[in-house]
Amino acid sequence: MTSSSPSFIPGPTSHARRGHVPRQSRRAELRIWWREIDRVLLALVLIVMAMGTLAVAVASPASADRLSNAAERLPDLYFLWLHLRWQALGLLALLAASALPKDMARRAAILLAMAMVIALVLVPLVGQEVNGARRWLRLGVAFQPSEFLKPAFAVALAWILSWRLRDPNLPVLAISGAAMALVAGLLMAQPDFGSTVLFFGVWFVLVLLADLPVQRLAWLVGAGMAALASAYLFYENARHRIDAFLGGGTAFDQVDLASRTLLGGGWTGTGMFLGTRKMSLPEAHTDYIFSVIGEEFGLLSCGLIVLLYVAIIARVLVRLVEEEDLFTILAATGLTAQIGGQAFINILVNLQLFPSKGMTLPLISYGGSSTVAICMTVGFLLAITRRNPYLARETFDWREILQRKGDAR
Amino acid sequence: MTAIMVSSAISSGRSQLVNTRQRSLIMARLRVLWVLAAFAVLAVAALLRIAYLGVVEDAPRGMSMYQLLLPPRGEIADRNGVPLARAFPAYSLWYNPAALDDGGAPLVKSPQQVARELVRIFPDMDVHDLTRRLQSGRAGYLRRRVLPEDANRIQEIGELALEIPQETERFYPQGSMASHVLGYVAADGHGRVGMEAVLDKDLLDPARRATPAVLSLDLRVQGALEEELKKGMLATEAVGAAGIVLDVDTGEVLALASLPAFDPNRIDAAGQRNMFNRVTNQVYELGSTFKPLTVAAAIDAGVVTDLSRRYQANRPLEIGGFQIRDSHTIGASLNVPEALIHSSNIVTAQIADALGGKALKRTMSDLGMDQRPFIELPARGFPIWASGDWPRLRTMTVSYGHGIAVTPLHLASAYAAMVNGGIWRPATLRKVEPGKAAKGRRVFKASTSARMNQLLRMIAVYGTGRNADAPGFRVGGKTGSAEKPGAGGYRRSTLVSTFAAAFPMDRPRYVVIAMLDEPKGTAASSYQRTAAWNAAPIVGKVVPRIGPLLGIRPDDTRDIDLSDLKPLVHGGVE
């Protein structure tokens, strides 16, 4: 029906439509969406999600077996079926978010950030305790506010930092720092050390982009070190993990089991569903899914996954170099840093290059809130990097930029 | 003035904003590249670490799909791929009283309690017996072949002394069927008796055990042969039975049965006694089944040119104080077809005498009767074979299957050569691909073979083989009822009854041999002990069962042409 409505023809009598954006047919909107979004990025993300489906399928028996008890025996592919449902929901969230116009996406993310901060305040009061940490909120459905805060927070920070274009004298750094401190405090109350580090990283990347002088950068790095040291001194869980990482751990602890699993398949893997070491690995379907992939599909597949994440990151960031809107650059970099940071922290933990922390592999690990939230992140990313392909852009010229930089000093 | 002032203030503010915007953009773009570089460094670190782990760390390899699915010992399958022997990892329940290793009691709970819990898992075990074994403190198997789910339940009892080692089990899905061909795997992991012993190296070779070893056997044919043999053996109260189905053109053994059989899944003392293979290892004087071979040798040598020539048949032949006689006087004289139909020793001996010992010996030796039978199985009996020149008496007794003892397999191979156009081939238990059959050696002329096919068919139509003449299958064959030698000469009451047959005689494809060891005269055999009444009916029942499986359909409209020989029998009157 909408497709049959007459198209808008400007004419002398059209003043009545002032302020009214001509309504396009849904098909035309879809066509525009398809034309404007970053299809390469979408394809890369879908490939990684498909690999995630496979990985959860092979990791599911291990976790189902581990979580079964005498009273109830979970079917082997229990987590696969659940994961497929979450992935379907996530894809819907992804497409819905990516279909928003850039301004709408920004507004939605900011509102979401506010809502999630409020939810985070509620978590310590009415939250649900799992594994010694209160991270879940049960409002009809249980969800983890910190997961949904991740994309929203990156966009909100980018928005705050881009205020300085309106008024260079606004203390945007202080405002964003205060927001960061608030979120960090709320997260450590759960406690959720891993997420705090991740949020801190995103914030750091954003203020780095927002013209932070090198001098203050050094201050920040120093402060970060101090924060880590204090976490080591005063936060027991972090101390244990860092000790275990530095000291090499004990045989058959989580890290050791993960390493045995990762190497269990050699270069080419045991073949699907034929891994045996994964069965003794805790959190096989979430934190250590990279090791399960290593056993079943081989180290070569692990390398492929690393390359895919790099491809996603590079695709977004290289395109941003030609971008002319500061908010877009900040928000997209923040979202990318959030996905990439989480992915690399997880991968490096699995490769024993980083102390273990409870963090899932984005787009691959099993998860409810985290799958939907990460899909929403990608959706926001697609929405914010939407670009009219018919508009010519200033190409990035190194020499010119360096020259201008010199002029500016 | 003020307007100009305001305007310039706005423009300076604007230019400052534009400047800020431009500067911020450039800075942001540059630092985006920093971020990209940082991620690139992380990725390179991760990739290097993966490469390091894969190259330097001793990654446990060899967990490929291929190796996981590789059986610990190769399968054995019949010619159609039906598994005859399989291997799979299984658990067993081993009692290890030393497991706790603290000098105290071997069990945490009381033996009675552990026994009760075990019986809850395995209801067929006995509580008292188990308690006694647990109390004895001696290590040993409590049970073999434990299913994985039962192994888990044993684990849940929580006794360290109950160990569940994983062991490779050899499983014969067909039970005792073809047990003599297959053999079994002993506790040392190596094969015994049958093809398990012959193929031991291949079955254990990691490079070759992935593909099943394919035998020439056809499980369906084997089943039919074993069942009919067993029925016949029980009906006649025989001590044993043997049978074989042989492809005449390739030498492939489609079925080979020696009864009583043993169960390779469960080797016990009774099974050990039955491991002797009557088909390849036991030699028998097979009696009158040799007569067609003698006649074929004589026709081939040109000694018998006229089948209508009559030989005297009512006077025993006396050679050196030994009398050759028939069981009853058949007639004053018989021609060659009549002699075969009525199985006359006297006439066959005269033909052999005319042929001469040298020629008969050469034919028998060409048929492989002077050495162990040709087959892969390790258990092969050496024939009782007279060396040197055969005197007249030896020649004459050999002509009707006495004074020579061979295995039923020897006879099957000889019959195959006689009916297939004259080519003798070694028997084999390996499947022969089309066109890859052994070349063999010519023993008889093709014309001789064609003539013998007529004669064998006539025996089944008119003579002692009538009970084997399954309608439509054009069976031809010869009975043989030989007295077994015992203390003080032949014993008239203990016989070896054999029927050696081939079908379809218009174009012979398979030789079928059924043999009963010491059958009694029972109601089932009309109180007769001779082959016509016990061995021949077995062939008569086996052929209609296996023929359609092997592509030979009963057809009343086809048969070998007997019209030229028919007038020679009973004066041409049936």
Image: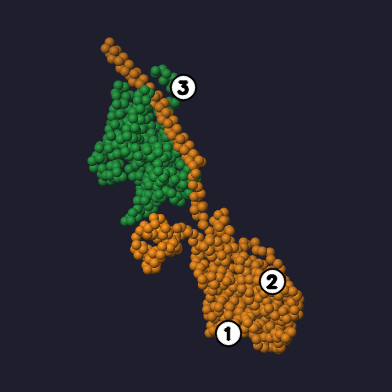
Chain colours: A green, B orange
Residue at the disc numbered 1: B528
- Residue A290's x, y, as percent? 42, 43
Q: Residue at x 40, y 24 (%)?
A: B26
Dots 3 and 1 on the same chain:
no
Residue B20 position (above or below residue A224): above
The chain ID associated with circle 1 is B
Which quadrant of the view contains residue B480? bottom right
Amino acid type indicated by mark 1:
Gln
User: What secondary structure is found at the residue carrying circle 3?
Assistant: helix
Circles 2 and 1, Cβ within 8 Å, touching? The answer is no
Q: Is residue B505 left or right of residue B395?
A: left
User: What secondary structure is found at the residue carrying circle 2?
Assistant: loop
Residue A399: numbered disc: 3
Q: Residue at x 70, y 73 (%)?
A: B364
Q: Which quadrant of the rendered structure holds the N terminus of chain B? A: top left
Q: Residue furthest top?
A: B1
Circles 3 and 2, Cβ within 8 Å, touching? The answer is no
Q: Residue at x 71, y 70 (%)?
A: B366
Q: Which quadrant of the rendered structure holds the C terminus of chain B? A: bottom right
- Residue B393's x, y, as percent? 73, 81
The chain ID associated with circle 3 is A
Amino acid type indicated by mark 3:
Arg
| Viewer-side residue, B424 vs B489 | B489
Between label 3 and label 2, give the one nearer the viewer: 2
Q: Residues within 10 Å of mark 3 (few under 14, many from 20)?
A: few
Which quadrant of the view contains residue A293? top left
| Viewer-side residue, B461 vs A351 | A351
Q: Residue at x 35, y 51 (%)?
A: A67
Residue B66 position (above or below residue B307): above
Residue at the disc numbered 2: B370
Dots 2 and 1 on the same chain:
yes
